[in-house]
Amino acid sequence: MVLLAEVVATSREVAATRSRKAKTTAIADLLGRLDPEEVRPTTALLAGELPGGRAGVGWSTLSSLSADPAPEPTLTIAEVGTAIDAVRAISGSGSTQRRAAELTALLGRATADEQQFLVRLFGGELRQGALEGVVVEAIATAAGVPADAVRRAFMLSGRLPATAEAALRGGEPALAEFGLEVGRPVRPMLASPADDLGSALAGAVTVEYKLDGARIQVHRDEDEVHVYTRTLREITRSVPELVELVRGLDCRSVVLDGETLALDDGGRPRPFQETMSRFGSQDPRDLLLHPYFFDCLHLDGTDLVDRPLRDRLDALAKVAPQHRVPAVLTPSAEQAAALFDEALAAGHEGVVVKDLDSGYAAGRRGRAWRKVKPAHTLDLVVLAAEWGHGRRSGYLSNLHLGARDPDGGPPIMVGKTFKGLTDELLAWQTEEFQRRETHRDDWTVHLAPDLVVEIELDGVQTSPRYPGGVALRFARVLRYRPDKDAASADTIEAVRALLPGG
């Protein structure tokens, strides 16, 4: 039986080192001591997540809680899980007060260190997306299985706790039992930045538009259709036009990866925020979404995730040719450049160059998919914001920006910016940031590190001012990315790669 105190101690050990190997060893040691029923909740806690998902508790509630700490650690993982489930089950009139009472009772059974851990856990402050990669490696170490087997099972299950349970229960054979299941979202494959189009064109590739839209994954089994976002959130009820379109394809079952966006009357993409606004609405009004698919992971009973991209594109051409993202197969340098110019002229971001021999490797920014844009952009985490002056008095303005630590630590600050913020964005972020705040001082409101913003910049320079040793040059806000979480933010390595000569 493992106590919460052991998880807290391991979490502290992981946070105290920059060594990925040390983090992996610490987590693996704890996983190796767990009883079978403790694996799922403990894995979630180690990844900074609430077992079972969010519990509907905001920072306003958490900041109002007060309980004397217990003198000695007694809370077990099972007891913490039961308490979290009880908080999650509360709804209806007076739910805020009843959640606060339940949380106060839980904190009253926790030591001071455990209290701090639980408050940060409920507030989302422990949820560092990069920690997933470390936990995956720790699961492999604890179970004595290859890390690639764990990654593949996690890709297909979408659930780290379930993956850990399988690995520790049955090893590699149990992990191999995870397959693509139509109706269960797959963690998406990601593209890494390329310096330029020429350097990305090595080998047999396809070059396709990089659309200024939102990532979607659609699953169909006969007449049943599900639509998911990049973060695996289901939005089926909000996008009836996509459901009907997929239901009309000539197939029995299919899983498609792609993007969707709203177009204006001239066929150009509407602002990204307008596309994203549909994901939280059940009323499409006049703003219709258009899908553009670029991958097919399953078709009529055949799973394709392990097939080379060229085979998956053949399947896509068979099932949805009219909805294929514009692309050129095995182009010459001149053809690739022409498609790049065409994409920009149509109002899109650039192109993605993809290796035709590559399998579908979810969640990893390798070299199989390379994105090429005309300007440098980074997806960074908002760490804090400073109150503005002059015309911006009363608004949270100057953003503190962090890059993802690939070794599972907290985001690494790389700069600040107040440029590119419209009056509308200033008003929105002032309200939104205070809902996400963890603490503040006279000039700055600090946030839970889970809000991603897309930043355009002229480059990067070395600087001792920030922990990462680099600073952004002439950074300006392009837009917020509600379709992404901290796990999707760019790493400190991606920032450093923009250094001159990098």
Image: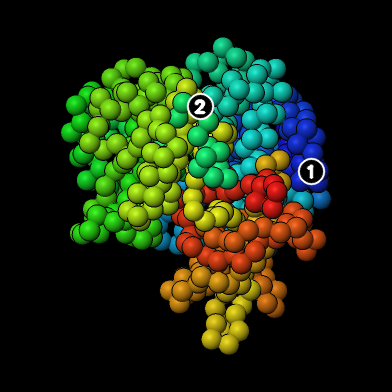
Q: Is residue 74 visible?
A: no
Look at the numbered disc 2 and give the secondary structure of its residue: loop
The residue located at (52%, 40%) in the rendering is 198
Residue receiving disc 2: 203
Tell me which amino acid carries mark 2. Gly
Q: Secondary structure at mark 1?
A: loop
Front residue of 473/154: it is: 473
* Image coloring type: rainbow
Callout 1–callout 2 Cβ contact below 8 Å: no
The quadrant of the rendering that contains the N terminus is: top right
Q: Position of residue 233 (x, y in %)?
A: 42, 43
Q: Nearer the viewer, residue 85 or 263?
A: 263
In the rendered structure, the answer to whether residue 240 lies left or right of residue 14 reads left
Front in this rendered view, residue 107 or 394: 394
| Quadrant in the rendering for residue 78 | top right
Res 37 quadrant in image: top right
Q: Nearer the viewer, mark 1 or mark 2?
A: 2
The residue shown at (49%, 63%) is 478
Residue extending furthest toward the top: 173
* Vertical side of 121 occupied by 473: above or below: below
- Identified at 42% across, 34% down, the residue is 332
From the top left corner, tell me how far across and down residue 395 is, in percent: 54, 78
Q: Which residue is mark 1?
A: 18
Residue 32: x %, y % from top left = 73, 24
Residue with the most extreme bottom position: 390
Give the answer, above or below, for where 348 lies relative to 215: below
Q: CA distance from mark 1 to mark 2?
A: 36 Å
The image shows residue 437 at horizontal and vertical percentages of 60, 65
- Give the residue type at disc 1: Arg
